[in-house]
Amino acid sequence: MSFYTSLSGLKSSQTEMSTISHNLANVGTNGFKKSRTEFADVIASSVAVNPTQMIGSGSVVQAIRQQFGQGGLIQNDSSLALAISGDGFFAVKTDLETNKVSFTRNGGFMVDADRYVVDGNGGHLQVYPVDGSGAVVATGLDSTVSLRLPEISGTPQATENVALSLNLSANAGIPSSNPVFTAANPYAFDRFNPATYNNSTQTTIYDAGGNAMTLTNYFVRETSGATSAWKVYSFVGDQQLGTDPANPAPIDLTFDANGVLTAPTTATQFGEFTPASSSTPQQISLDFGTATTQLPQAFSVASRTQDGAAVGKLEGLTVGDDGIVRATFSNGDSKALGKVVLANFANPQGLRQLGNSYWAPTGLSGDPTLGEPGVNGFGALMSGAIERSNVDITEELVNLIAAQRNFQANSKALDTASQISQTIFNIRS
């Protein structure tokens, strides 16, 4: 019996060393949870045996229990690096065909080629769908969706109306009277020659696809005196705009002696043109309003407006303490994409390990209970951090030494039992 008793201790010690070795091997595995081996003694008894004379039959591995204590948190530059401080698991969809959902503490998420937020194994992070204000619109595991980042935001709108309010300097000279222009070099407006105009200004406008274009207005003083006249040449890219597209002409501005704009009194409607960045024709009206003046001060633009709109390109992503994932775009839009789902279990130690820091529920763990960060016992959600393994190397090495000593002691007992048996076999009558 002593042989089998020592053998059972030997097997138990070997199992403990294997468990500790597995813990040590995963010291650097994010979200890993260590395990502990628990033993029970084995007693063969009956009512006919005197309790004071019972001898045990060895040991047996009762359970290898997972320890879900908090692992250390390390900082990370990514806003999609998430960590749970406290209880809870992230829900990830590991098989899109079967909609299989697993649970993990490894929050090292990233964006894949299809703009889904995934972990290092390709599992899709699950979130609750939300409305524009960030309020959750559906709950339950079947209502969760895979978090996907949009490329753009907003609806493009072609510019139709541009309004400028500016001051043209009353002290400005007339370019045509500049001595640089001679009979051999006569005056003619040339947008590539600053000597042929007084001032210019640029306004960003948009085509039907939301692509940005530049409307450039060149201001040329024509006359001075009691009334003063200016010409305004307008270009979008290399195309000159005019009321007659076939023969575009500049807009005539006139001011009285007080510098008040007298003409035009309404917006100028340019003819239809097709931008180089789009195949859709569009028309633009330019309005100088009543605030445009000709005063002795330097040229300046007081206000500039246009009614076009571009689509916004994704520029940033944040995950709040409440789990709301919010995207920001180049056009100033901000959109809530979902709310990170946290799951917990009545008995986490009953979860089945799947590898890759994944767990699946079992009858021992109970069904997952879903919640939100920081609510009803769920842990706090931290962005820009990742939870490391909860393995303490020093503790595990001490346990490994103790397990090794147990193994050696049981091995010695086994060897002694074997020698005794050999001695008995060698006795000759």
Image (tube, rainbow, N blue to C red):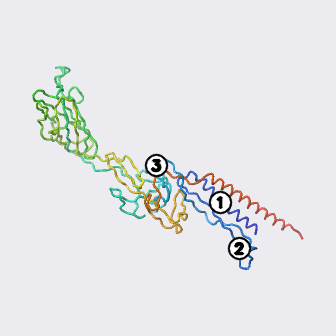
Q: Above or below — where is 300 with respect to 371?
A: above
The residue tagged 1 is: 16
Residue type, mark 3 in image: Gly
Q: Earlier in the sequence, mark 2 or mark 3?
A: 2
Judge the density around disc 1: few (<14), some (14-19), many (≥20) Cα neighbours within 10 Å: many
Task: Pick whichever of labels 2 and 1 is earlier in the sequence.
Answer: 1
Residue 61 sits in which quadrant?
bottom right
Residue that protrudes farthest toward the bottom in the picture: 48
- Name the residue located 61 percent from the left edge and 65 percent from the top edge: 63
Helix, strand or loop at label 2? It is: loop
| Viewer-side residue, 189 vs 104 | 104
Q: Nearer the viewer, residue 218 or 343?
A: 343
Q: Quadrant of residue 218?
A: top left
Q: Helix, strand or loop at disc 3?
A: loop
Image coordinates for residue 155, horizontal then vertical, percent = 28, 50
Distance between mark 2 and mark 3 Cα atoms: 56 Å
Picture coordinates of residue 80 (x, y %)?
44, 50
Which sits in the foreground, 367 or 422? Answer: 367
The answer to whether residue 336 is left or right of residue 347 is: left
Disc 1 marks a residue whose amino acid type is Glu
- Residue at 53%, 57% (x, y): give it: 357
Q: Which residue is mark 2?
A: 44
Tag 2: amino acid: Ala
* Residue indicated by mark 3: 384
- Disc 2: CA contacts within 10 A as few (<14), some (14-19) or many (>=20): few
Q: Earlier in the sequence, mark 1 or mark 3?
A: 1
Residues at marks 2 and 1, CA–CA distance in whole angstroms: 24 Å
